[in-house]
Amino acid sequence: MQPVLGESQETPPAAPDAAPADGRRARWTEHRRARREDLVTAAVEAVRLAGPEFAVEDVARSAGVSKTVIYRYFGDKDELVDAVLGRISEAILLPRLMGELVADRADDRAQLHAVIAAFVSLIEDEPALYRFAYAHAGRSGRADLVAATEREIAEALGVLMGDRLSAAGRPAEAAMTWAYGVVGMVQLAAHWWSAARTVTAAELVDQLTELAHGGLGTLLPPVR
């Protein structure tokens, strides 16, 4: 196949047979890693523009390359989708939610309000990425960003609540149940709201905060 005009030809070095060749192989490995990351960035932008049903052609257009180049770094579209889901989780979703979860605030209600507001704002700020994540939830044998994010947030919340119960000399076994219950409630209600829009985002956050705090406020010992 003839090279596409404007595309660099990325040919791996010959098989290493000495220390200098080992250095070339390491540089080539780093080049591939960086190039792949650039293509994932382009794929995220393609999702923002084209929506959850983006095509590989959309990614190629966003990156300014041909589909052939995309497939040098990803075996198929599923592998590319997994990489995009990983980027959304690691660079967009979890940093924002986990940052709010561990931040110091005046009381539990303020803490819950901040975390719930962060999740709802993600739906507002990144609607295409949010729909993309849900479009690929529950894929057999593939990455599930929704389930993985729920699990990570719930586990972190459960640890925080368990530590608080233990510090007050109370049994902590129920902490993880409560954490998964709260996270699941917020996630399902917010997902329903993302389509129904029966109230404003601010009203949704207040309603979910009252519901979550109404339960946890009677179960957790006061902050010392």
Image: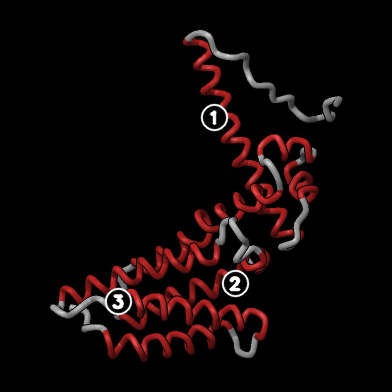
Q: Nearer the viewer, residue 50 or 26?
A: 26
Q: Nearer the viewer, mark 2 or mark 3?
A: 3
Residue marked by disc 1: 30
Per the rendering, the mark at residue 123 is 2
Answer above or below: position of 27 versus 125.
above
Mark 1 or mark 3: whose residue is earlier in sequence: 1
Residue marked by disc 3: 175
The structure residue drawn at horizontal position 77% and vertical position 40%, both measured from the top left corner, is: 64
In the image as oriented, which residue stretches furthest toward the left? 169
Q: Residues within 10 Å of mark 3 (few under 14, many from 20)?
A: many
Q: How far apart are labels 2 and 1 at the CA level?
A: 34 Å
Instruction: Give percent across and percent down for residue 101.
Output: 37, 69
User: Under tag 1, what secondary structure?
Assistant: helix
The structure residue drawn at horizontal position 57% and vertical position 82%, both measured from the top left corner, is: 201
Instruction: Give percent across and percent down for residue 193.
Output: 61, 83
Q: Nearer the viewer, residue 54 or 17?
A: 17
Q: Judge left or right: residue 222 versus residue 29.
A: left
Instruction: Give percent across and percent down for residue 190.
Output: 56, 80
